[in-house]
Amino acid sequence: MLGLADDINQRGDHATAAAMYERALEMSDDSPDIHVRLGKARLAAGNTEAAKAAFRTALTFDIENPEALLGLGMTQLQLGEVEGATRNLQKAVPELDTRQAWSRLGVAHALLGQGEAAQHAFSRAVALAPQDPDTLTNLALAHALVGESTEAITLMQRVSDSPLAEQRHFRNLILVLVLSQDLDLAASATIPDMPDSLRQSLIERAQRIAEIPDPVERARAMGLAMAK
């Protein structure tokens, strides 16, 4: 049943997979591994509170389980419990040492206005996946958050030159350029399939973000990409 549930989960039917993991728990002894799998499936299905409960249950069996700590931190981020998420992610991430884990920790630090700590986490994520545009974008936004404009622009130019770049990455290019006070380049940079009206709207939104004095509120307005 676990193998079938894993297969169904990988195919994207997360709600059915979650139900099968629940059934597997009824048929066997409690296992932190199954509770972690259940939590991941519930989280992917959008059932965040139930996912949080599953990860917490896994931790009652193994308080230092890094996958359960990562999952709990991810649910807390989605629920807006950023301080708790950061605490749990800091325990799990160095042991797991994956792009996704470091990216989640970077987002948590950024949402607390901790720009340098966010840079460190995103830098490690980039080292693990140097071509991933979301990870590069988050590192650029972390640099922009602390006023390091040159580094932020260089990274976003690298992203925009990538064949993997999508519209959301070009939107963040405009955000970084405006935060770096390079309005001319924001208005003239070559961006495929973006109408002038949308570009102007993005510039105006970025200007409003740049005017936010509090670094925590500015980071939240910037909307760092949650790692996929």
Image: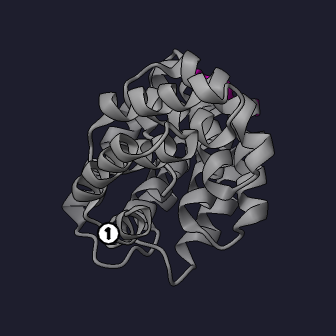
Magenta span: predominant SS is: loop
Question: Could you say which quadrant of the image residue 147 lies in?
Answer: top right
Residue 49 can be seen in this image: yes
Residue 21 locus on image (x, y percent) = 36, 50
Q: Is residue 137 left or right of residue 127?
A: left
Give the number of callouts.
1
Residue 178 can be seen in this image: no
Q: Is residue 71 above or below residue 11?
A: above
Q: Amino acid type of disc 1?
A: Ile
Q: Say which of 179 and 165 sits in front.
A: 165
Residue 161 locus on image (x, y percent) = 57, 78
Task: Report if residue 80 lies within the magenta region.
Answer: no
Question: Could you say which quadrant of the image residue 206 lies in?
Answer: top left
Crowd around label 1: few <14 · some 14–19 · many ≥20 (10 Å): some
Q: Is residue 194 left or right of residue 65?
A: left
Residue found at the far bottom of this picture: 163
Q: Say which of 40 and 182 sits in front.
A: 40
Q: Is residue 98 left or right of residue 196?
A: right
Image point (46%, 19%), residue name: 81
Q: Is residue 1 above or below residue 55?
A: below
Q: Which residue is mark 1?
A: 8
Image point (76%, 32%), residue name: 116
Q: Circle 1 — which element?
A: helix
Image point (67%, 61%), residue name: 155
Residue 74 locus on image (x, y percent) = 49, 37
Residue 44 locus on image (x, y percent) = 34, 51
Q: Say which of 44 and 126 sits in front.
A: 44
Q: Say which of 1 and 186 sits in front.
A: 1
Magenta range: 112-116
